[in-house]
Image (cartoon, rainbow, N blue to C red):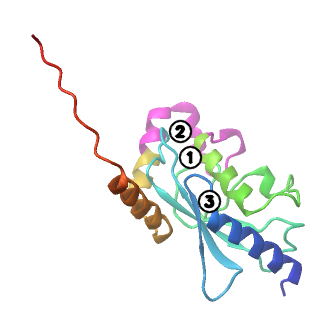
C-alpha cells in the first residue's frame, strides 16, 4: 500500500515535470496508475548514446517516497558500464546517498549525466567497463550499435517538441538573402 504522502509528492513532481521538463527529458504517465510511469532521456550529443531515446521505469511499490528512492531501471537495453543487462542502474544517489529533497527530476538528470560521464570503477556491466578502460573505440562502437538497434524510435512524449519546432520555424519571417558580387 502506498501512502497518501507518496501519491501527493508524486502528483506535484509529475505535474511540474510535464509543464517544465528539463532539456531532453520527458515523463510519460500511465492513465491507469500514477505509480506506473516512465521517464525518457534523449541521448546526449557527443556520446555514443546521441540521438537515442532511453526509457527508465519507476517503481514505487512498497517505497516510502520521498523518504526512500523509487526503484529505477532502464527499460531500453543500453551498453553502459553502470547499467546491468537487466537494467539496474548503479548511481549512489539512488541508493545509499538518497536524500528526501531529491525527486524524479533529479533522478532523470543524474541518469542523463551518467550517459555523459560513465564510471567504469562502479560497474554493473563488466564487459562495458573493461572495454571503456582498455579499448575506447570498441566500447564506443558497441554502445552506438546498441543505441541504433534499441533506442531509435522517438516516443510520443517527444513528438510535441518536434511539432513545436515546426510551428516556430513556420512563424519566423523569411530572412532576405544577401549576395556578394565579385566586381
Q: Position of residue 145 (x, y in %)?
A: 40, 50
Q: Position of residue 177 (x, y in %)?
A: 22, 34
Q: Is 97 in the magenta?
A: no
Say whether residue 105 is left or right of residue 26: right
Instruction: Indicate which disc residue 127 carries.
Output: 1
Give the structural element (helix, strand or loop) at label 2: helix
Find the distance from the CA under tag 1 to the CA under tag 3. Answer: 34 Å
Please state if 102 lies on the left or on the right of 146 as rendered.
right
Magenta stretch, residue numbers: 117-141
**What is the secondary structure assignment of the residue under circle 3?**
loop
Res 183 seen here? yes
Question: Where the N terminus falls, by quadrant?
Answer: bottom right
The answer to whether residue 124 is visible is: no
**Residue hosting label 3:** 21
Using a 10 Å C-alpha cutoff, classify the residue at mark 1 as few (fewer than 14 neighbours), some (14 to 19) or many (20 or more): few
Counting from the top left corner in percent of width and height, residue 35 is at 71, 80
Front disc: 2 or 3: 3
Q: Which residue is mark 2?
A: 131
Q: CA distance from mark 2 to mark 1?
A: 6 Å
Do the CB atoms of the residues marked 2 and 1 lie less than 8 Å apart?
Answer: yes
Q: Secondary structure at mark 1?
A: helix
Could you tell me which residue is drawn at 17 percent across and 26 percent down?
A: 179
Q: Quadrant of residue 89?
A: bottom right
Mark 1 vs mark 3: in front: 3
In the foreground, 141 or 153? 153
Q: Is residue 44 left or right of residue 12?
A: left
Give the farthest residue toward the top. Answer: 183
Amino acid at each position: 500500500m502506498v501512502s497518501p504522502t507518496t501519491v501527493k509528492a508524486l502528483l506535484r513532481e509529475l505535474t511540474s515535470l510535464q509543464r517544465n521538463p528539463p532539456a531532453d527529458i520527458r515523463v510519460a504517465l500511465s492513465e491507469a496508475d500514477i505509480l506506473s510511469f516512465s521517464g525518457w532521456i534523449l541521448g546526449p550529443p557527443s556520446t555514443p548514446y546521441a540521438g537515442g531515446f532511453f526509457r527508465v521505469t519507476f517503481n514505487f511499490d512498497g517505497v516510502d517516497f520521498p523518504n526512500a528512492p523509487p526503484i529505477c531501471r532502464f527499460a531500453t537495453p543500453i551498453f553502459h558500464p553502470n547499467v546491468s543487462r537487466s537494467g539496474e542502474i548503479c548511481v549512489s544517489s539512488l541508493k545509499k546517498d538518497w536524500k528526501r529533497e531529491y525527486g524524479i527530476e533529479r533522478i532523470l538528470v543524474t541518469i542523463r549525466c551518467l550517459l555523459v560521464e560513465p564510471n567504469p570503477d562502479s560497474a554493473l556491466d563488466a564487459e562495458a567497463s573493461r572495454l571503456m578502460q582498455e579499448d575506447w573505440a570498441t566500447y564506443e562502437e558497441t554502445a552506438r550499435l546498441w543505441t541504433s538497434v534499441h533506442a531509435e524510435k522517438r516516443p510520443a512524449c517527444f513528438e510535441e517538441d518536434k511539432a513545436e519546432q515546426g510551428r516556430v520555424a513556420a512563424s519566423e519571417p523569411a530572412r532576405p538573402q544577401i549576395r556578394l558580387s565579385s566586381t
